[in-house]
Every structure is written in C-alpha cells, then in structure tokens.
Image (spheres, rainbow, N blue to C red):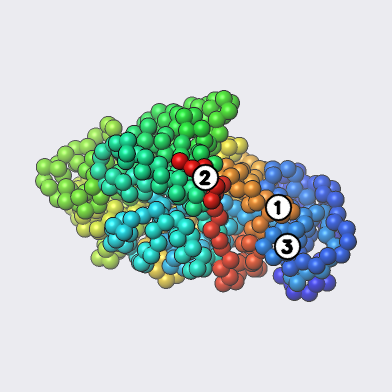
Amino acid sequence: MTDSPTARPSRRNLLFTAALLLVTSCTTVSNTSVEPVAGAQSFDILIDNGLIVDGSGSAPYVGDVAIRDDRIVAVSSEISGSAKRVIDARGLAVAPGFINMLSWAADALIADGAGESDIRQGVTLEVFGEGTSDAPISDKMAQTDESRQGDIRYPITWRSLDQYFDAMETRGIAPNIATFVGATTVRINELGYADVDPDAAQLDRMRALVREAMDDGAMGVGSSLIYAPASYAETPELIALATESARCGGMYISHMRNESDMVLEAIDELIEIAEKSGGPAEIYHLKQAGRDNWGKLDAIIAKVEAARAKGLRITADMYTYTAGSTGLDAAMPTWVQEGGYEQWKTRLQDPATRKRVLAEMRGKPVGWESLYYHAGPEKMMLVGFKNDQLKPLTGKTLAEVAAMRGTSAEDTAIDLVIEDGSRVQVVYFLMDEANVARQAALPWMSFGSDAAALAPRGVFLKSSTHPRAYGNFARLLGKYVREEKRATLADAVRRLTSMPAANLGLKDRGSLATGAFADIVIFDPATIADTATYAEPQQFAVGMHHVLVNGEPVLSDGKMTGARPGRAVRGPGWNNCPPL
C-alpha cells in the first residue's frame, strides 16, 4: 500500500495478469465490461489495477475500486482521481468480503477481537446461531453459561440480542458479526432442558422471544437437532418458530435431525418447515456421515433441487473437509443428557444407567444419531478439554486413550465426560472426499467453517482445534477452484459473498457495487491456500494480501493492522417486525 495520491501503478502487463488468472482460476477474463469513471475525484482509498471479481458470478475484469468513508463509491475499469491511500492490486483478485455462514467465533472475539484465522482467509462477516445464540437469555441462563465456560472466561452482562450487539461493538472486533436466534436458546428460556413439549401458552411466549430477537436484528431461527435439548423439539414447534421468523423476513437454518442413516428424512423435515412457515431454509454443513451413507448424495441433491423447482428457497452450506468436530454428546443417546450437563454426568455415574448407555453406544443407533457408531474410536481425535489434567491427551484418538487406560472405548468416552466437566471436543472422521469435492461445486452451496476465529497465541493454545478454523475458505479457493477446477473463481466468490448475503436478506453487503459497504478482500488466486492440518491445525492460510472491513484495513500487505472496525450486521426484521 502506498500513501501517495499520485502513486498509481502503470497498466503494463495487464494481458499477462489476465492470462495468469485465466490459467489459475479457470475463469474467463474481461477487460471491457465496465466503462471508465471520468472526472477527477478524491477518495479515501483507491484499489488500483486489480482483477475485479464483483460477487455477481459474471466474468472478472481488470479495474479499480474507490472507497470513501465506509462505502464503495465507484467500481470501474479505470477511475480517475486522487486518494489518501492507493492499493496496488496488480496480479491480485479484488472481491467482496467473504461471509462465514456458520461461525463459532463469538467467544474467541471476546478473548481477542482480531478474528485472525478468518481475517487471513478473507472473512469479513461471522454469522453465529447454530441452535444456540448469545441472546435472549435469562439471569439463570447467564449464570449457567458462565459456570460452563472453558478456557475463555468472561462475565455475561447482556440479556437481549440488542444488548449483546452493543457489547461486542463496544469491546472492539475486526470482522462484522451477525446471528440467528437459537431455537435451543428460545426453548431453554421457556422449558429448560427437559424433554417436554410446550403447551399453547408456552409456545406463544417462545414465538414472542423469536419476534423480539428478529426485531433486534437476528437473521432468522437456527436449530441443531441432534443435541439435547434441541432434539426434544417436534416439527410443529419448529414450524411455529420459523413462521415467526419468516413474518420478519428471516430464514430457518438447521443442523438437521440426522446427517447419516436418516439424512433424507431429515431433509424432508427441513423442506416441510420451509413450506409451512413461508420462509427460506438452509441446511447447515451438508454431509453424508458414515461410509454406509456416502452413496446418498445424488438423492440429497435431487430432493433439494425438486424443492427449489417448486419455488421453495432451499440452500445449504458446507465446510471443505472430510472430518467434522463436535462433542462426545454426539456419541451418546440424548435421553441420558436430559436436564443439562450436570444431570447427564450424574446419570453416567449410576451403574444401571451406564450399562444401558454402553449397550446403546455399541449397537446401531435407534432414534438418535451416533457419530461414535459412524466414525469409530480410531477416527475420533480428542482436541478440546476443560480440565487441565486431561489436556495432555489432546491430539490422541479415543482408541489410543482407551488403550492407555486399559478400558473399552465406550467406557473411556463416558469417563472423559465425567472427568472433564464438559462434553469434550472431538474431531470425527466421517465423510467421503469425492462427495466433499462434488458439493463444493453445487450452485446453491455457500460455506461456513463451523469453527472459531483463532490465532496460535495466548488462550487459544490451551486447546487444539479442527483445521477448518484456519483453512476452510482458503481451501475452497486453493484446492477446489485452482487445483481441481471444481468451480470457477467467479462462481466460488459468488457463493462466498452475494449469494449468502441475499439468503440473509442483506442488500448492502456481499458485492463490489457503488453504495455497498466496503468489505473487500484482495488475494492472489495463484497462491491462496490452507496450510492447517489435523496434526498441526493452528497454521494460518496464505495468499490473502489485504482485507478491509467497513472501509478500514484490518489486514494490510499480509499484516494485521490492529483496527477494530467490525459492526453488528442486523437482519431484515430489525425494528421492522410486524406486530404479533
């Protein structure tokens, strides 16, 4: 980056640049799609001579982007004028900031507002809310949540979503944030952790909580139906909450009730919820878990595309890896977890209950989804403990720990939950690479890391993680676009930007267009890549040169600037929900 208003690079070698990008991204390049902007003007930042990948999916072209304050004020093949800063983007792609449709960065941003592992991949909007959300919560819920905190500890001072957004902006964050209101959070507010159905009055209060969150700026309702107590919710309850969200312009998004043996039936439920609620719906982290289910992708695609052909707005997102990550709660039946962690632990310490749980873990699951069954202890890597005495086990498989202890894998899993005071974080190897690659090219597929935004320092070194926390988006652009040519650069950028923005109902994010917020990334399509591995996950991606959030650089020439311009991005219902 240069500070001189006159230091604008020559347009020599543009044909070389275009040819290079054509080879590396399999994208048709145009240098004549946008007319020059005539007349000298003054800008805060001028991005000069880059390959403009505007988020629409149309052919890229070599051009400029001008920024004043927090907005894009011009995008053209050539812009005349001066600027306080000029970014030389020759040989680099210029695109809208990427949207992480499934982020768990909330706690990490409280510990360190940089969000560095995602910023270094171009993420400028982190979207929370898979099942649980930071608000709305009661005093009792806040107290419980504080008691269950792990490495990152902080007081929960907010209760409403509006208060949460204000707290995060005041703290200072580099990326923008948004959230769905968690269906589980709404349920706990009214029903606690019990396996019960709401009566009419309780359901009305749950709907009111959704409406209040939507009016505060939630993007819709998010569910996570394999986990207790979310798994206790019946379809009509979910339809009622999604209907309230849809009335405010929101969408329903779900970690479906099953992603393995009953994945097709789970998609049917999601489609039913969309149809009866009147709103769009998205499948969180679409997958086919377990080798026995790898052959179901054709049927999954057919279901989604048939619903879309009927006019239903059904989409999906994914992470670009063959392993997922969640807790040991996904290895045990949900009935034993009723009432929350403390009651789960107490039941596991009862010999008769433990015997029943062991039997269910060792058999094919009936009525619940067992990632233990589909992965097996040899393909379950332990990556996150709350108890410092157990942290030396980080990186070992459940099978290895069982062998060390001389106990069965099932007994070891139960013991670890009891000893750790948490569900223990696990990487489960479940999916087929051919399916992952094929999904990455689907036109209705966006992307989410399903992870926090971290850095290899401080509190983040107390636990390990999944490599998707450091590489999900760079892996898409490096492996699946450049190397395997599963998608063009223009289409991949569309599905990282304008498509998820449209799904969320955002009209001024996700595109390089005049008037849009200046969330912009500048990267090298020839070198962008993930470097994180399962053995060494805490390694930054490479190839991202500049990232701007609301017009302010947070990454400049590959270095973090320390700026914290991130804001709460609120959904279409913000201060606009119709009355109940």
Tell me how far mark 2 sits from mark 1, CA to CA. 29 Å
Residue at 36 percent of width and 43 percent of height: 205
Query: x, y percentage for residue 574?
Result: 54, 50
Residue type for callout 2: Cys
Q: What element carries label 3?
A: strand
Q: Mark 2 or mark 1, which has the lower sequence index?
A: 1
Q: Is residue 525 left or right of residue 573?
A: right
The mark nearer the N terminus, 1 or 3, is 3
Mark 1 surroundings within 10 Å by alpha-carbon count, few (fewer than 14), some (14 through 19), many (20 or more):
many
- Residue 477: x and y in percent read 61, 50
Looking at the image, residue 13 lies above or below residue 207: below
* Marks 2 and 3 in Cβ contact (< 8 Å): no
Residue that badge 3 annotates: 67
Q: Name the residue under label 1.
A: 512
List the residue tagged with mark 2: 577
Front residue (pair 493, 397): 493
Q: Which amino acid does label 3 sit on?
A: Ile
Whether residue 295 can be seen here: no
